[in-house]
Image (spheres, rainbow, N blue to C red):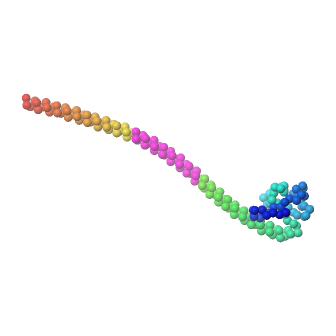
Amino acid sequence: MVVEDERPNVVQTTPSPELVSGSPCKKNSHQETIIWNHQTSKCPSPQLVEQTVINENGADNSNDTLQDKNSESVSNSEIAGDDLNDAKAHLSDASRRIHEMDIEIKRLENEREELSIAYREAETLRKQEEAKAQRLASELTSVRHDYERRLTIKEEELDSLRYT
């Protein structure tokens, strides 16, 4: 019994009792030759591998069909291989860009931290300088009042000495 597989160019057969009991590499009683999937290198169990059964009387027509299907399969395989290589290249490029971006992010985080530290230090220094400026302004005002008071006292003494 032959059943078409969903994948293109693959035909499955139900193994005959002769094949199950004996070696799958031999011909069975109906003179059918078992042809294994081109990806298999040894003679596997018929239950596990997809097989195509060709009657030796109709081998010419089947061979042409198999060759057409095989060339179609090879061309589809090449296209799929090219697509796979393109996808791998894109993935590699994307991975490289992600790695570069991770490095850039770390650099920017370090720079941000350094700037944050510098800002806090500058803010602390600004507050210290403001406090110093206020203290100096207060001292200046105090000294000015003291000198003005002394000046007034001296002027009063001078006025009193002039009128005496």
**Residue 49 percent coordinates (x, y):** 81, 57
Whether residue 161 appears in this view of the structure is yes
**Residue 95 percent coordinates (x, y):** 60, 53
Question: Position of 80 compared to 115: left or right?
Answer: right
Residue sitting at the far bottom: 61
Residue 71 quadrant: bottom right
88 magenta-colored: no
Which residue shows up at 81% across the image and 61% down it? Answer: 12
Figure check: 106 above or below 49: above
Quadrant containing the C terminus in the rendered view: top left
Question: Position of 31 compared to 49: left or right?
Answer: right
Which residue shows up at 86% across the image and 69% down it? Answer: 58
Figure check: 96 above or below 65: above
**Residue 20 percent coordinates (x, y):** 88, 56
Residue sitting at the far left: 164
Whether residue 23 appears in this view of the structure is no
111 magenta-colored: yes
Which residue shows up at 77% across the image and 68% down it? Answer: 68
What type of secondary structure mainly makes up the magenta span?
A: helix
Residue 73 quadrant: bottom right
Quadrant containing the N terminus in the rendered view: bottom right
Residue sitting at the far right: 29
Numbered disc total? 0
Which residues, given as a range, are shown in magenta? 97-124
Residue 52 quadrant: bottom right
**Residue 10 percent coordinates (x, y):** 78, 63
Which residue shows up at 58% across the image and 52% down it? Answer: 98
